[in-house]
Amino acid sequence: MTSATPPLRALWRHHRRYRPRFALAVLMTVLNTAADVAPELLLGVAIDIVVRGSDSFVGTVFGIEGRFEQLVVVAVVNALVWVVESLTDYAASVLWRGLAQAVQDELRTEAYTAVQAMDIGWHERTPSGQVLSVLSDDVNQLERFLDVGARTVLHTALTVVFVGIVFGATSWQVTVLAFLPVPVIAWGSIRFQRRLEPLYADVRSTAGEVAAVVAGNLGGVATIRAFTAEQRESARVARASREYRLANARAIRSSSAFVPLIRMAILAGFSATLLLGGWYTLQGRLEVGLFTVLVFMTQRLLWPLTDLGQTLDLYQRAMASTRRIFGLLELRPSAVEGSVALPSPPRGALELRGVRFGYDDGPDVLQGVDLVVPAGETHAVVGTTGAGKSSLLRLVLRFADPRAGSVLLDGRDVRELTWDSLRGAIGYVSQDAFLFHGTVRENIAYGRPDATDAQVEEAARAAEAHDFVAALPDGYATVVGERGQTLSGGQRQRLALARALLRDPALLVLDEATSAVDTETEAAIQRSLARVTATRTALVVAHRLSTVRDADRIWVLSAGRVAESGTHDELVARGGAYAGLWAVQTGEHAPSSP
Ligand SMILES: Nc1ncnc2c1ncn2[C@@H]1O[C@H](COP(=O)(O)OP(=O)(O)OP(=O)(O)O)[C@@H](O)[C@H]1O
């Protein structure tokens, strides 16, 4: 999940449209730094006036005799410089921070969109906490650097340049000595940066690990409590957290070593200016005013450099984060959208031809499945657990593509179809019947937000959900908790069915939950199934065979192959796998031991 592209280059390329704003921010920082350095120069000029009178720099350039008059000129120029300094400081601050906000906002949204488009298989493999930590922590880390760090780096570099110009114009010997620390610091920065890069990559990945463990545990908190595994899980979180702490400590140790290095280099530069500059002044080779400027300038040059360690740290952390953000942005789903739209309205005819499918590098879980559901019919897929029933439905929805063979909807390979055409034709009810935090009404209308109340209610009735919804405290306005946890499993299932029906899909795909349902619910499911499948094509994965005994055809899947197919009566008469399952479920005889 980490990008190999150098992070600054990736940012520069990705945010083309911010380049003008960036240029303006840089310009403001240049002006601001120039205005920032000027007062030291003016101080030197003032001392020059006091010491040399009419022979001073101002006296000769402006032709002003009196010392006080000259000082007035300096005071006016100084006031102007301050105004420029204040205005550009404001502009630079607004521009840099605005840039930071725009970039973080855009990156977060884009990274989320990229993640959302990834294959379902990718989501199953990737802990959601990892993704979450990139979208929040890493994006914030970059924001912090752009907010202040980038400006500080530029400001420091420009100060070095401006001070260098002043020094250069004064005495090359002093310039050389005063600037001695700069190459040392530059060399140190590059070395430290190399050393810190893997350390901060480690910090970010351990931070992601902590988030992954915590998010995973919060999702399974009921199981943790039920198995009194609290201590074990707390210890697991503590371990991950300690790894993060240790990774950070390693990075901080290296990063902090940079500051003393800078300080020593600075000390050398400062001492050199003081001694050599002083020596020249005593000899009369350097004006007192200029000497003062040099001493103050060295301070001005060297002070910001002491902050460089901190800024470098901020930069390095931000770059490690940027690599992770771009790692998400560079993700490409393996299932790409086709370009063909089905003629409307679709009929929902489904066909699987020689379909082989497996997960990642694993073995085939579907081993050449042929299956046909003609338009308007209701078919069921049954089989023992792990036979590949849910995997088959994934292929129909194109949550994954087959390794070989093809899936056809209305005679077109689903890989050729647009998402709208494919998924718009299908109403899908998954095993886990996921609901969002929101009202019952919002959940039912999820696939058709503009549906009227009457349409929502009609769908709920068809799914046998209306009665229990009406009995909820606020009816359709009742808020169901995160993932619909305030409802029972059967209720969630029926709301999910209503949601699928409201889209009036040509093909209804139901993955029936394994959860044992009571006879009343079972009867309700059967009734609604009979009603909603009367006018459309349906493919139902069923665990309870009684719910699908009226299906036009039942496909019996066994170890990734179609073992047999036919109507309920035909299959029972055949005395094969289905007849065995049926006998077990209706209690006609006990299962034979393997
Ligand atoms: N996301 C996944 N990654 C890897 N393997 C998977 C994944 N999902 C399912 N499998 C494997 O694929 C095989 C078929 O699983 P599938 O869920 O399709 O069976 P099923 O017939 O729907 O089972 P059940 O009746 O228990 O729901 C199983 O061996 C399972 O371990």
Image: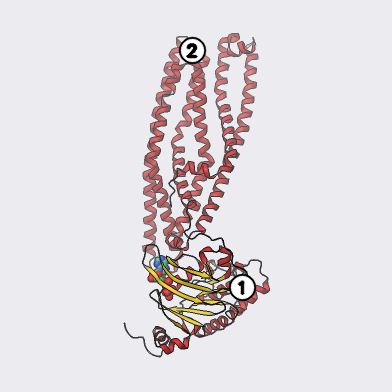
Label 2: few (<14), some (14–19) or many (≥20) C-alpha neighbours in 10 Å: some
Horizontal side of 37 relative to 515 (left or right) equals right
Q: Give the residue pinned by disc 1.
A: 504
Q: Nearer the viewer, residue 490 or 412?
A: 412
Tell which quarter ligand 1 is in. Answer: bottom left
State the residue in front, 273 or 526: 526
Q: Is residue 548 above or below residue 312?
A: below
Q: Which one is nearer the viewer's eye here, 112 or 559?
A: 559
Q: For the residues labelled 1 and 2, say whether their Cβ atoms are less than 8 Å apart.
A: no
Between discs 1 and 2, the one toward the N terminus: 2
Q: Position of residue 548 (x, y in %)?
A: 50, 83
Element under disc 1: loop
In the rendered view, tell whether residue 436 sits above or below residue 96: below
Q: Quadrant of residue 525?
A: bottom right
- Residue 278 vs 490, above or below: the answer is above
Where the C terminus falls, by quadrant?
bottom left
From what the image shows, is residue 288 above or below residue 357? above
| 3D distance between C-alphas at marks 1 and 2 | 90 Å
Q: Camera-side residue: 384 or 291?
A: 384
Q: Number of numbered discs present?
A: 2
10 Å crowding of disc 1: few (<14), some (14-19), many (20+): some
Q: Is residue 1 visible?
A: yes
List the single residue furthest toward the left. 594
| Badge 2 amino acid | Leu
Q: Which mark is on residue 286?
A: 2
Q: Mark 1 CB in 8 Å range of ligand 1?
A: no
Q: Helix or strand or loop: what does disc 2 sit on?
A: loop
1 or 2: mark nearer the eye: 1
Q: Amino acid at mark 1?
A: Asp
Q: Residue at x 53, y 51 (%)?
A: 108
Is residue 207 toward the left or the right of residue 163 in the image? left
Q: Position of residue 411 (x, y in %)?
A: 54, 70
